[in-house]
Image: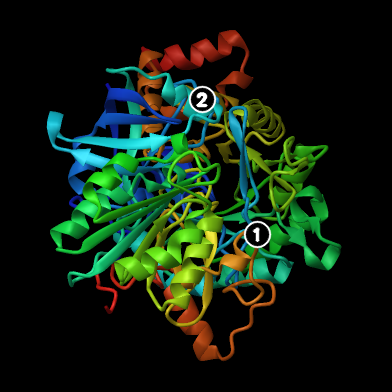
Amino acid sequence: MTPNDTDSESGPVQVRGTVLTVRRVDAYHAMTIVAPGIAARFRPGQFVALAVGGPDTSMLLRRAFSIHDVRPDHGGTVEFVFSAIGPGTRWLAERRARDVLDITGPLGRPFPVPRDPVSCLLVGGGYGSAPLFSLAARLRERRCSVDFLLGAASGDRIFGALTARRTGRSATITTEDGSLGVRGLVTDMLGQVIHEARTDVIYACGPMPMLRQVTALGGRYDIPVQVAVEEAMACGVGVCMTCVLPVVGTDGITRMVRSCLDGPVFRGEQVRWDEVGTIPFDAFGAPGWEPRSRRAAQAAAANSGHPHPEQPAGKQGHGT
Amino acid sequence: MAPDLRTRLGHVELPNPILTASGCAGSGRELAQFFDVSKIGAVVTKSVMLGPRAGRPTPRMAETPSGMLNSIGLQGPGIDAFLRRDLPWLLARGARAVVSIAGSTVEEYAELAARLSDAAGVTAIEVNISCPNVEHRGQVFACDPGAAAAVTEAVRGRARYDIPVFAKLSPDVTDIVAIARACVSAGADGLSMINTLLGMAIDTDTMRPVLAGITGGLSGPAIRPVAVRCIWQVREALPDVPIIGMGGVRTGRDALELILAGASMVGVGTTIFHDPSACVRILRELEEELARRGVEHLADVVGLAHEPRAAARRRLTGNVL
């Protein structure tokens, strides 16, 4: 059975969820919605996609947000964090308790977690840190140690600093303006934290330039990096084909894969960061793409439909 | 009593008129997570080409008022992978498959039609002629009656006789009726309309085009009146040609509007991005809209808006009595 087939136990659901709370968290908003089916299926790293603007909305595209946390109360609730920067997110920020929203989830591939108790470093940029806390809880269940490295432009844009300090073995904060923690970027502190924490695995979520840098530094220390990417999506469920990025498969072939279905979590070194936003000349089906042999062409075509080339079956260890 | 929603796609009978619109439903697999794809009239697949295609760079979409622009560039794995994986998957689930095809030359379209005819289970072929013709300075087939007819004739000639061929028309033409006539004369069993309208958006902060592909196809409720107009004009000129109507359908009421203009089937497109289970919702709403008006057979209201008021009323009440 392919992951795209209907699976009532693990596949996403579309529900009308009742808003429980919308609260301001520093520069961001956090919304909690009652959605038992989504909460029950959730694994860290997955996301939800919401319709915004009400039944006669002129905003057709769904808004996708990483799931911050799920809780068992009210049968199952889902919380996500967002920044009210556009008309859709501003509309969401104006919702009140008992409003009903159309929500789909949990969507995408979750973070794979190691089999063995290893040292994990969780790196978050801005509210990209939101999915890292449920991941941390799951990692601790596996007796992994968890260190946090969170960065943002300013202190009010660090999401979850207190939780990171309370629950992490260590928590390092960086801000560009120096208003909280160390002045600078997360990548300035990454090497030092890796040394001190003796990091075995890095998980990162945040802006693409940050993910690219973290992947490069992880590679320098020979540490596997799992990234959750942020690509613009229209549907979140794999039909619109807008959220693609170039990813190298285990067969060495680059494909334009959908970050909603084949991600949002990827192994960092398999994303062709320099070519994000382009079609690499050697990508499967690119204008210059030529199979090296007929066999290679067939192999590429055979894999192209289930393009999950980079995820080693989701829950495998990191070889550490 | 529930209205009879059966309709005909060429000589093929469909249980109801609600289809997915090409490019908005993949090959059905992704949407099967949200509804049973065998419950709608047919799944119209994303346009398949002969070879694999990576598509255009990102950003590929922009939200616009009640619509969106897209510039995907027909990304897909090609006909081999489609026949090996996607078509059998649809058939195994009891779905009816209308396969959209796209090419850069007349011969590519013809070869696709032949390949689909060799496979069992294709309900119909929809010819996406809104592609640049590489043999003719990249002019879009759909914008020239001669080129549109050449593609249609080639596909009809190579497609198995019992597979209906529908040509999908672009609204970006001076005279859509002329293109429709050309396709029908070339052997099209029916027409699909409308494809997207060419549009563009500029980011006023970066002062650059939003889409990497610069221009993109505009879709969504914003274009529905254009769809209604195109369907109306073609139905007026060619009243016996079956039409699959699409363009901004969001509710059962919208589907009924296209049906009244002359469509006997309705494709749901961009609305799927907003609501992945939209097809079954719109089917239910359409049924309610018809029942509320005392319509017993869908066929009775196809193109009804063309009839004078009194005649239209007679046609409906005749069935009620």
Using residue A60 as the reference point, say whether residue A92 is left or right of it.
left
Tell me the amino acid under the disc marked 2.
Answer: Asp
**Distance between the Cα atoms at labels 2 and 1?**
31 Å
Write down the residue under mark 2.
B254
Q: Is residue B212 above or below residue B194?
A: below
Tell me the SS state at disc 1. loop
Tell me the SS state at disc 2. helix
Using residue A193 as the reference point, say whether residue A186 is left or right of it.
right
Per the rendering, the mark at residue B56 is: 1
Q: Position of residue A84 (x, y in %)?
A: 49, 29
Q: Position of residue B93 (x, y in %)?
A: 29, 57
Which residue corresponds to the image point at 56% horizontal and 32% vertical from the top-left?
Answer: B248
Chain to which the residue tagged by mark 1 belongs = B
- Residue A280 picture quarter: bottom right
Q: Is residue B293 above or below residue B60?
A: above
- Residue B148 picture quarter: bottom right
Q: Position of residue B71 (x, y in %)?
A: 65, 50
Q: Position of residue A146 (x, y in %)?
A: 25, 59
Residue at the limit of the structure toward the top, as seen here: B310
Tell me the amino acid under the disc marked 1.
Answer: Arg
Name the colouring of the figure.
Answer: rainbow
